[in-house]
Amino acid sequence: MQTNYYQLTITLKDDFVEFIADFIANIAGDGGVEIGEGQIIVRSESDLTFVKDALVSLAGTLSGSIDMDYTIEEKENKDWIKSYQDSIEPIEAGKFYIFPSWYEPKEGLINIKIDPALAFGSGHHATTFSCLSAISEYVKKEDKVIDVGCGSGILGVAAKKLGAIVDLCDTDPISIESCKENFSLNEETYNKLWEGSIDKATSTYDVVIANIIADVLRFIAEELKSATKEGGYLILSGILDKKENLVKESFKDLTLEKRTLKDEWVTLVYTKEAK
């Protein structure tokens, strides 16, 4: 263990803490994350400047809708990684058992191994949990599925374990690498994976999954709908309850199949009716 570690403190509106923490989970590598009211603390033995740079880039793509302040410090090390690992427990979500590598798989459920940077990367976050439950219900063998904004790849891995043919995309190159690592960790393969968004898709899908914040869902609504086959499903998550009606307005030409609310986060499942 190194004698020193790096600490990145992010100050932001409390409404966005869980979303940003989820984003960090996909890129922080060996980092551990602590969240509080209006604050996120990231600790790692590696320099965390790349995490700050990724957050600055993310804020830019969201046209300044999330304001963040950053402080990076170098501190004396303690065995905080082991303490963090001891705080992470597996979780059951739908048909799946999501567990870190320091736990054993569980019989009777579909096992997915994820070594999270924090609990939100492992299925504990409300949006990830609800998406896994929706995948359990709506994805079937041989379905063509795409995960838009794939992050750690956990949702794509889940769909693949149900026998689906899986494509994935994300605008963040670090998330692309994280996705590759987690597919490999679970001894699964994807069909296609690219850096970018749904506008680069060349086919349509039985199930389209997009666990992204509400403003981005609205921005790419037409592309998401176009990528969904007639009779297919569109699973939308990452929606704070106060933004729900704005998202619904963008997808009002589809049929709302199911709504799930968990910890102020809404997941919507739509069907695209055959014309």
Image (cartoon, rainbow, N blue to C red):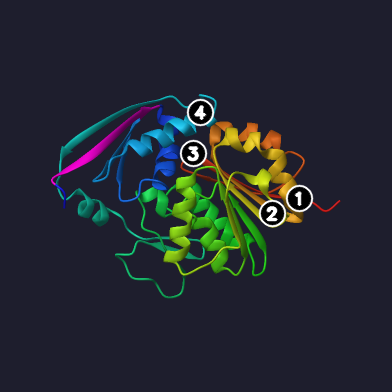
**Residue identified by numbered label 3:** 264
Tell which tag, 3 or 2, sits nearer the viewer: 2
**Residue identified by numbered label 1:** 272
Dot 4 or dot 3: first in sequence order is 4
Per the rendering, the mark at residue 127 is none
Q: Compared with residue 214, is residue 255 higher up or lower down, i.e. above or below?
A: below
Which amino acid, by three-letter code, is at mark 2?
Tyr
Dot 4 or dot 2: first in sequence order is 4
**Residue 251 placement, left or right of 95:** right
Q: Main secondary structure of the magenta part?
A: strand
Q: Residues within 10 Å of mark 2 (few under 14, many from 20)?
A: many
> Would residue 222 be visible to someone looking at this image?
yes
**Residue identified by numbered label 4:** 60
Tell which tag, 4 or 1, sits nearer the viewer: 4
Alpha carbon of mark 1 to alpha carbon of mark 2: how far?
A: 6 Å
Which amino acid, by three-letter code, is at mark 1?
Lys
Instruction: For mark 2, give the secondary structure.
Output: strand
Is the Cβ of the residue at disc 1 closer than 8 Å to that at disc 2? yes
